[in-house]
């Protein structure tokens, strides 16, 4: 049963409070001509040695010194609060993980996710030498307003408008600024785009606005009835791990106070989903400063539990500073209609819900929007936006200074080889 659910939707219910998700299957529902390559998405935790040996033994040997050193230290007041939070959610995490380990058919699928549906030629590896465009650097130069992206539409996409001129017999082309501009693919097919000799895959019915925080106000709709019902936010929180990896610049917490969350809301209100780390200092900032500033009322917490290809956790559950889960804080931001009694919240949000997956690249969050739709106020289909996005999804608006990061064609394979 779990296996069939996963194959069809990318989501498999383990029990009433836990799910296993395959981000690749979920993402691929956004594409018609291309698909996300599982071998490039799952770039970690599929090493043959890690899958075969006891993960616990390897974790203990690698991190034992750090753990022993921590044991002789007493926890300060803030760490004690964080530990209490951990102890409260721990039973839910353990129960969810036990349910996964008992789903033997699902575990068989999990071990093969990285090669799922790939022919020998499609199971490619990302080259460490291959260059990527640095959108943050590119957007910071004075020539940024002159940078244009080329959108290549197949002529069989009947929704293509905007004129354009033929690039080839089967292609029509649109050229548009890539920075500080809403770039949209309103068609029913994914399209290929070009920017400085790099190719990017744009999902069907999606759009992105690439800018820094100084330009985010341009995303605010002219009328609140055109605002967003679901707002997912994954800020680049300042932390030592991100600095060590040198993957992307982080920002001090105070910068996020200026995000115009209230102005982005639909007139019926919005469900706000905020990714946070397990640092108590950050949780305290969100609860006492950030959510009040945004006008968001806390509702519930979801947890992303990370596992390896063999189903074991990516780290020790009780390891204080490197726990194998992240938290998604959920809250409601009221719209104009909320105070007039026209709010249409469908269901109360269950607290401590757990979703499990094998992580992709560093800092890449799984697409969890579908798990939230039952709790989104307003009419369907919901208007959804992701702030600080690094990839795109059909039906969503993606804002940030690198929403095309994981849209690079290196992460995709063409479906033409399957026909």
Image (cartoon, rainbow, N blue to C red):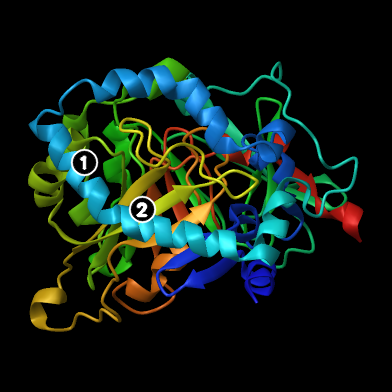
- Work out whether residue 304 can be spotted: yes
Callout 2: SS:
strand
Q: Position of residue 323 (x, y in %)?
A: 38, 38
- 35 on left or right of 119: left
Which of pointers 2 and 1 lies earlier in the amino acid sequence? 1
- Work out whether residue 182 can be spotted: no
Q: Position of residue 285 (x, y in %)?
A: 13, 39
| Residue named by callout 2 | 232
- 126 on left or right of 60: right
Q: Nearer the viewer, mark 2 or mark 1?
A: 1
Q: Residues within 10 Å of mark 1 (few under 14, many from 20)?
A: some
| Residue named by callout 1 | 83
When the figure is inspected, residue 245 is found, relative to residue 99, above or below; the finding is: above
Identify which residue, 299 or 77, lies in the foreground: 77
When the figure is inspected, residue 26 is found, relative to residue 5, above or below; the finding is: above
Q: Position of residue 31 (x, y in %)?
A: 68, 58
Q: Quadrant of residue 237?
A: top left
Identify which residue, 73 or 195, lies in the foreground: 73
Q: Residues within 10 Å of mark 2 (few under 14, many from 20)?
A: many
């Amino acid at each position: 049963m779990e296996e069939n659910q996963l194959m069809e939707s990318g989501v498999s219910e383990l029990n009433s409070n836990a799910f296993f998700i395959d981000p690749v299957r979920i993402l691929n529902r956004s594409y018609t001509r291309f698909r996300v390559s599982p071998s490039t998405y799952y770039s970690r935790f599929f090493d043959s040695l890690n899958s075969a040996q006891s993960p616990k033994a390897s974790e203990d040997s690698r991190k034992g010194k750090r753990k022993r050193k921590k044991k002789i230290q007493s926890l300060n007041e803030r760490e004690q609060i964080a530990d209490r939070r951990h102890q409260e959610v721990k039973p839910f995490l353990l129960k969810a993980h036990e349910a996964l380990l008992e789903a033997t058919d699902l575990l068989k699928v999990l071990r093969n996710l990285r090669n799922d549906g790939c022919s020998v030629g499609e199971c490619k590896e990302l080259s460490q030498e291959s260059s990527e465009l640095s959108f943050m650097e590119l957007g910071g130069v004075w020539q940024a307003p002159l940078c244009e992206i080329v959108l290549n539409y197949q002529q069989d996409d009947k929704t293509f408008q905007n004129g354009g001129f033929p690039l080839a017999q089967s292609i029509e082309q649109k050229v548009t600024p890539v920075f500080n501009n809403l770039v949209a693919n309103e068609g029913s097919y994914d399209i290929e785009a070009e920017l400085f000799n790099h190719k990017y895959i744009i999902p069907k019915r999606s759009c992105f606005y690439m800018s820094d925080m100084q330009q985010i106000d341009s995303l605010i709709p002219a009328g609140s009835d055109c605002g967003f019902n679901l707002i997912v936010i994954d800020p680049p929180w300042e932390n030592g791990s991100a600095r060590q990896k040198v993957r992307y610049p982080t920002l001090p917490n105070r910068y996020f106070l200026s995000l115009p969350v209230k102005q982005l809301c639909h007139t019926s209100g919005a469900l706000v989903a905020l990714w946070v780390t397990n640092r108590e200092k950050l949780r305290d900032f969100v609860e006492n400063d950030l959510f009040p500033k945004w006008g968001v009322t806390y509702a519930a917490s979801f947890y992303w539990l990370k596992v390896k290809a063999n189903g074991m956790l990516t780290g020790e559950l009780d390891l204080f500073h490197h726990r194998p889960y992240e938290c998604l804080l959920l809250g409601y931001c009221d719209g104009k209609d909320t105070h007039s009694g026209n709010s249409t919240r469908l269901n109360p949000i269950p607290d401590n819900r757990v979703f499990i997956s094998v992580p992709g690249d560093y800092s890449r969050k799984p697409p969890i929007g579908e798990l939230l739709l039952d709790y989104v106020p307003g009419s369907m289909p919901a208007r959804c936006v992701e702030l600080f996005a690094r990839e795109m999804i059909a039906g969503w608006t993606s804002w940030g200074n690198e929403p095309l990061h994981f849209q690079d064609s290196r992460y995709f394979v063409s479906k033409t080889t399957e026909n």
